[in-house]
Image (tube, grey):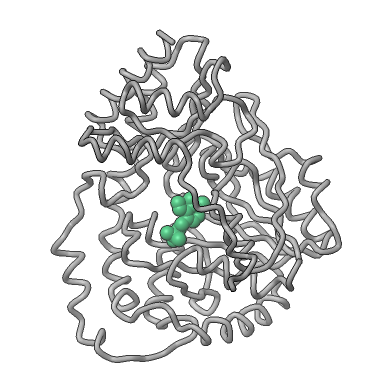
Amino acid sequence: MFSSRTDWNTTPNRLSSLASEKHLRGESITDLTESNPTRCEFFYPTEEILSAFTEPSILLYQPETRGLLSTRKAIAEYYAVHGIDITPEQIMLASSTSEAYSYLFKLLCNVGDEVIVPQPSYPLFEYLCQLNDITLRSYRLAYDGEWHTDFPSLQAQFSDRTKAILLVHPNNPTGSYLKQNEFDQICSLASKHHSSLIADEVFGSYNISPDIDCATILTSQSFVPLFSLNGISKLLGLPQLKLSWIVVDGNLQQRNEALNRLDIIADTFLSVNTPIQVALPKLLRCSSDIRNQICLRIQTNYRLLQKVFTDSSTSLLRVEGGWNAILQLPQKYSDDTWAEEILTHQNILVQPGHFFDMVQKSCIVISLLPISGLFDDAILRLHQFIKEK
Ligand SMILES: Cc1ncc(COP(=O)(O)O)c(C=O)c1O
C-alpha cells in the first residue's frame, strides 16, 4: 500500500529505548544531545520578539513566490552588514532549511540523479535524498588534528548523474569550516563536472576559533550555480518560527534561470507564513544579542572540555564552529556501547558518532548548548567515568 521510499525501520534503537525506560522510571537524565536552543536557558528579549508580531500587515495576505520584498530586503541588509553584497532578488524564502534542500533537489535533479554530501555530517541528508528520489553519495572528511576535505574521495564520487555537491560550513557535527583553498578546488571540480554547489551556512555565525582562514562562500567568484542556505533556527535561535532562505549566486547566466524555476516550485507550496515574514526585519535587529549569548555558551563549554580532557586516552577533536563537539574515547568499546554505558551508569545522554556516519572509531557527539553549570557537572562525571572504565 505504501511507497518503498517510506519503508523505514522505525524500531527505536537501544539507546533511545534505554532513555525511555529511564524516563518512565522517573530518573533524571542530563541531555548532552540537546540542540534546541529554546530549552537551554538563553535570555530571549520576549517583549521585542512579541512586538514584532503586532504589525497590522500580518492580517494582509500577499502571496509572493520568493517571499515579501520587505523581508528579503532585511535579509540582504543583514548580509551587507557582514560585507556580503547580494540583492533581495537573489533571495528565496522557505519555511525550513530542509524545505530549501527539497526545493533545490527538485530544481537540479531528476529521479535517480546524485548529490555528493560530506561524511560525517547531518543525518537528515539521507531522508531528504530518499524523499526526493535521488541518490546520496558521500565524500569523506579526514581528521589529522583538524578536519580536511578528502579530495580523492570526493573525486571518486562524481558520475554523469552528479548534480550537486553539498558543503556544510561549518559542518555538523565536526564543527569544521571549509578553508578558502578547499572551496576554490571544490568550485573547479563542480565546474568540470557541470555540478552546482549547495552551501549550508546555518551555523556560519557560530565561530569558536576566530583565527582560522575560513572560506567566504558568497563573496568568492563561483563560476558554477551556487546556493547558500541560512535561516533563523540557528541565526536567531528560534527554530519554532520556521523561516529559512536560499541565496542564489554564482554563474550569472544560470542564476536567473534557477530563480525563475524556483519561483514556480515555491509558488506551488507558498509555505512561508505571513507573520514571520512581517516580523523578520524587527527580529533581525534584536538577533545579535541572542547570537552573542549562544556564542559565549559554546565557547565556554568548549573551553571546559579542553581543560578537562587533557589525558591521552580520550581526545577532544578540534572544533572551529557550530554547536557540537566530538570526543574520541578509548577504543575498547564501540561508540554505541560507550553511549549505552554512559547513559546506564551516569544518566548522561550522548550520541554515538555513527549517528552522523562517522568512520572514526569510538566517538561520541555532545552538544555545546546546555547551560554551563549543568554541562560542567555532566562533563566532570563523564571524564571520571571514562577514566575508571
Ligand atoms: C547542518 C544543518 N542544516 C540545517 C539544519 C536545520 O535547519 P532548519 O531548522 O532550518 O530546518 C540543521 C539542524 O540541526 C543542521 O544541522
Residue in front for this viewpoint, 159 or 27: 27
Left or right: residue 355 versus residue 26 is: right
Residue depicted at 46% across the width and 36% down the height: 14
Q: Please, which residue is most extreme toward the left here?
A: 47
Residue 296, given in percent of the width and then of the height, sits at 31, 38
Residue depicted at 36% across the width and 20% down the height: 382
Left or right: residue 177 versus residue 321 is: right
Quarter of the image containing the C terminus?
Answer: top left
- The quarter holding residue 277 reads bottom left
Residue in front for this viewpoint, 297 or 214: 297
- The quarter holding residue 182 reads top right
Residue in front for this viewpoint, 155 or 126: 126
- The quarter holding residue 161 reads bottom right
| 98 up-or-down from 335: above or below | below
| 213 up-or-down from 383: above or below | below
Residue 232, given in percent of the width and then of the height, sits at 38, 61
Residue 202 seen anywhere in this rendered image of the structure? no
Residue depicted at 54% across the width and 36% down the height: 212
Residue 383, given in percent of the width and then of the height, sits at 38, 16
Residue 174 seen anywhere in this rendered image of the structure? yes
Residue depicted at 62% across the width and 52% down the height: 167
Residue in front for this viewpoint, 129 or 257: 129
Residue 65, given in percent of the width and then of the height, sits at 49, 85
Left or right: residue 112 versus residue 45 is: right
